[in-house]
Image (spheres, grey):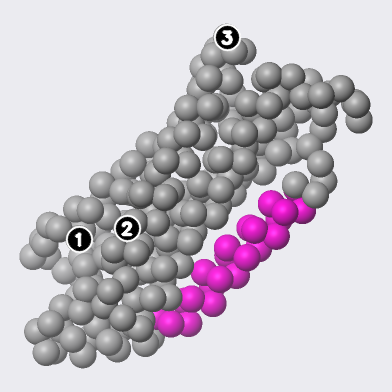
Amino acid sequence: MSTLPLNDFENKARIHAHVAFFGYLVALPLGIFIARYLRTFTNSWFWPHAIVNFVITGPLIFTGFALGYQLSAMGGVHFYDPHQKMGRALLVLYLIQVFLGAFIHWVKLPFRFPGGRHPQNYLHAVLGLAIIALATWQTHYGLWIEWAYATGNVHPVNWRCKDFWLAIVVIIWSLYAIGLFLLPRQYRQEAAARRKGEGYNDDVPLI
């Protein structure tokens, strides 16, 4: 490993990695867990979920993307390798997810599936999980492949960073799996509320 200090490109790449990682694999999952866990105990879960996933997560994701775009400009070409293309795709998917969540909350469509849920609720849930899964792949690619490719690997990624990545990924998917055990309770609450005509805030999806 080189004893030379990081150059400007490497410093910016490191900041990009940290910001994007915490945006997609810390802040965004936190917003999901707020919805997944809190909604089975209180009706007042939507705004904490929305604030974390937009007000906190949004600036991290936009900043991470902007830094990545600047790095690719320093290399002379935009969106030419899998990491750059996936970064663009994740940003687009995140924006779609935010607008879809707002649409579900404020626009009430009459059609529902059996069980009382709107089709877009399921789309929101699946899209949220897809973003986390793709971000898991993206950050892995960045740590294991893109850093070495883009920087020449003069300063290889520390294995403690890779171990931290693995720990966070295991925690995310474990907490989500555990949260699924709360679904029966959630369904019972929503069914009881619908019978009373209260709606019980079931207008945002399963995540």
Q: What secondary structure characterizes most of the magenta part?
A: helix
* Whole-number angstrom distance, CA of label 1 to CA of label 2: 10 Å
**Residue 174 drawn at (x, y percent):** 60, 70
The amino acid type found where label 3 is placed reads Gly
Residue drawn 20% across the image and 79% down it: 200
Residue drawn 15% across the image and 58% down it: 106
SS at circle 3: loop
Residue furthest out toward the top: 76
**Which residue bears the numbered disc 3?**
76
* Whole-number angstrom distance, CA of label 3 to CA of label 1: 42 Å
Q: Is residue 8 shown left or right of residue 90?
A: right
Query: Is residue 126 at all visible to an observer of this figure?
Result: no
Q: Is residue 194 shown left or right of residue 204?
A: left
Identify whether 107 is placed above or below 137.
below
The amino acid type found where label 2 is placed reads Ala
* Dots 3, 2 in contact, CB < 8 A: no
**Residue 104 drawn at (x, y percent):** 21, 58
Report crowding for label 2: few under 14, some 14 to 19, many 20 or more residues within 10 A (C-alpha).
some
- Quarter where residue 150 is shown: top right
